[in-house]
Image (spheres, rainbow, N blue to C red):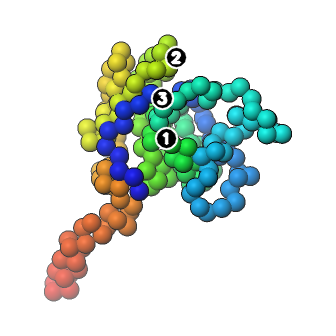
């Protein structure tokens, strides 16, 4: 897993609400359990016609490693492939005012930071990005803040152990192994009690 601390980048604005996992990565591409190669299929049906020819779409000309999306991002089926596709395409964070719970968990388990902000902050950030697509956003995971010039700063929630996992590049198993001495001490104390 990749370590995440501070992300400073321009953003890709995808202001649509209720983006479901089938829009993120269409089900017809879910034929492998390898995490690689899904990035090229990200938002495929928005980017290509049925014959594979490209169509003008919301992603054209946008760059950055942060996606700023509408509310209720990642709803729909529980496919982990959605987080894989976003991460494989080079994104490190998704900003929204709400996330589907399963998507949020899948993102956190795959080195993708879901940054949940208030609707008001998202609205101001979206307007600022429309006015200036080169606007740089800073996400500070240790401080749990997101900020941009002219937009301000807001804190975002994250579960403590998931924050530690992201900052150290740990999977859930790595997290447990990082504290194996405490676990063994607890087990030893339990045996003697």
Dot 3 surroundings within 10 Å: few (below 14), some, or many (20 or more)? Answer: many
Identify the image quadrant of residue 32. bottom right
Q: CA distance from mark 2 to mark 3?
A: 11 Å
> Helix, strand or loop at disc 3?
strand
Question: Can you give x and y, in whole percent of width and height, for residue 109 in the image?
Answer: 45, 55
> Where is the C terminus found, in terms of image quarters?
bottom left
Indicate which disc, 2 or 3, sits on the residue closer to the N terminus. 3
The residue carrying mark 1 is: 91
> Where is the N terminus found, in terms of image quarters?
bottom left
Instruction: Give the camera-side residue of 143 and 66.
Output: 66
Indicate which disc, 3 or 1, sits on the residue closer to the N terminus. 3
Dot 1 surroundings within 10 Å: few (below 14), some, or many (20 or more)? Answer: many
The residue carrying mark 2 is: 130
The residue shown at (75%, 33%) is: 54
Question: Can you give x and y, in whole percent of width and height, for residue 8 in the image?
Answer: 37, 32
Residue 11 has which mark? Answer: 3
The residue shown at (41%, 37%) is: 115
Instruction: Give the camera-side residue of 142 and 156.
Output: 142
Q: CA distance from mark 3 to mark 1?
A: 9 Å
Instruction: Give the camera-side residue of 80 and 131.
Output: 131
Question: Can you give x and y, in whole percent of width and height, for residue 24 in the image?
Answer: 62, 42
Along the horizontal axis of the image, is 74 left or right of 2?
right
**Above or below 3: residue 42:** above
Residue 168 has which mark? Answer: none
The residue shown at (59%, 25%) is: 61
Indicate which disc, 2 or 1, sits on the residue closer to the N terminus. 1
- State if disc 1 and disc 3 touch (CB < 8 Å): no
**Above or below 172: residue 60:** above
Dot 2 surroundings within 10 Å: few (below 14), some, or many (20 or more)? Answer: few
């Amino acid at each position: 897993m990749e370590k995440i601390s501070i992300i400073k980048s321009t953003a890709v604005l995808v202001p649509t609400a209720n983006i479901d996992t089938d829009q993120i990565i269409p089900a017809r591409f879910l034929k492998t359990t390898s995490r690689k190669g899904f990035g090229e299929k990200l938002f495929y049906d928005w980017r290509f016609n049925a014959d594979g020819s490209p169509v003008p779409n919301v992603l054209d000309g946008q760059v950055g490693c942060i996606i700023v999306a509408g509310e209720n991002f990642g709803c729909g089926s529980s496919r982990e492939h959605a987080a894989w596709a976003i991460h494989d395409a080079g994104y490190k964070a998704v900003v929204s005012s709400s996330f589907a719970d399963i998507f949020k968990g899948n993102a956190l388990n795959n080195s993708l930071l879901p940054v949940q902000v208030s609707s008001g902050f998202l609205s101001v950030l979206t307007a600022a990005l429309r006015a200036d697509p080169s606007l740089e956003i800073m996400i500070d995971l240790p401080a749990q803040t997101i900020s941009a010039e002219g937009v301000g700063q807001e804190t975002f929630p994250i579960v403590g152990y998931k924050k530690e996992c992201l900052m150290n590049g740990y999977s859930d198993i790595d997290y447990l192994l990082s504290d194996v001495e405490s676990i063994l001490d607890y087990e030893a104390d339990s045996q003697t009690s």
